[in-house]
Image (cartoon, rainbow, N blue to C red):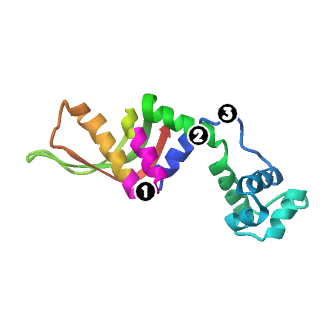
Amino acid sequence: MATVGDGLNQAAQKAFTRPIPKTAPVQMRYLVKQLKGTKAAAAALGISQRTVERYIKGQIRKPRAELAGRLAGEVARRWQPQVRAKAKKTAATSTGLVIDTRARFGYTAAPGTTDDARLRHLTVALPPQYAGRLFAAQEAGATEQQLRDIAAEALQDVYFRDGGRRAGGLLVEFTDVEQVAFDL
């Protein structure tokens, strides 16, 4: 199942100006430098400090699949923080975000209309205020449900209510998210 938090992280990673290091020893050296020591890097990856030292020296070159995924994730999370911050600020102040999602949308609507939830694929440009709210909530440690609620409110306002021009009493529920991606 796709998560809004992962989608926001991937959107920020698209702003990178240089590629993430490819080999495990280079990734490990970067992580050690960022965390200011082999002990902290070992704790972040759940391995021994000696194993980290072996990667740095080049004695171990190929990590097992599970460790390779954790290492790549930790490096990506810390890669080019200034570029990532600038991209988020630009999205929050001027350009906004584009959300591409396939999910089930349900409604609380006026009597006489159908409120059955149905699966839809939407690609919608969200204004900067919603981009700012999403990024701010993510950095504040919001749960996945809280991020979904902000995304649902944004889709409700921009797509379903058309900025207040129609369906004034409509409340949108954003459930069963199959796919969600963002673009800056």
The numbered disc on residue 17 is 3
Pointer 2 residue = 84
Residues tagged 2 and 3 counted as in contact (Cβ below 8 A): no
Give the amino acid type for the residue marked by disc 1 in the picture. Answer: Ala
Residues tagged 3 and 1 counted as in contact (Cβ below 8 A): no
Quadrant housing residue 146: bottom left
Which residues, given as a range, are shown in magenta?
131-147
Classify 10 Å Cα crowding around label 2: few (below 14), some (14-19), many (20 and above).
Answer: many
Q: Position of residue 119 (x, y in %)?
A: 33, 47
Which residue lies at the image location 46% right of the left edge and 48% below the top edge? 179
Q: Position of residue 145 (x, y in %)?
A: 38, 57
Pointer 1 residue = 142
Specify the farthest residue to the front.
36
Between 147 and 172, which is closer to the camera in this rendering?
147
- Identify the mark nearer the N-term, 2 or 3: 3
Asked if residue 173 is among those painted magenta in the image, a careful observer would answer no
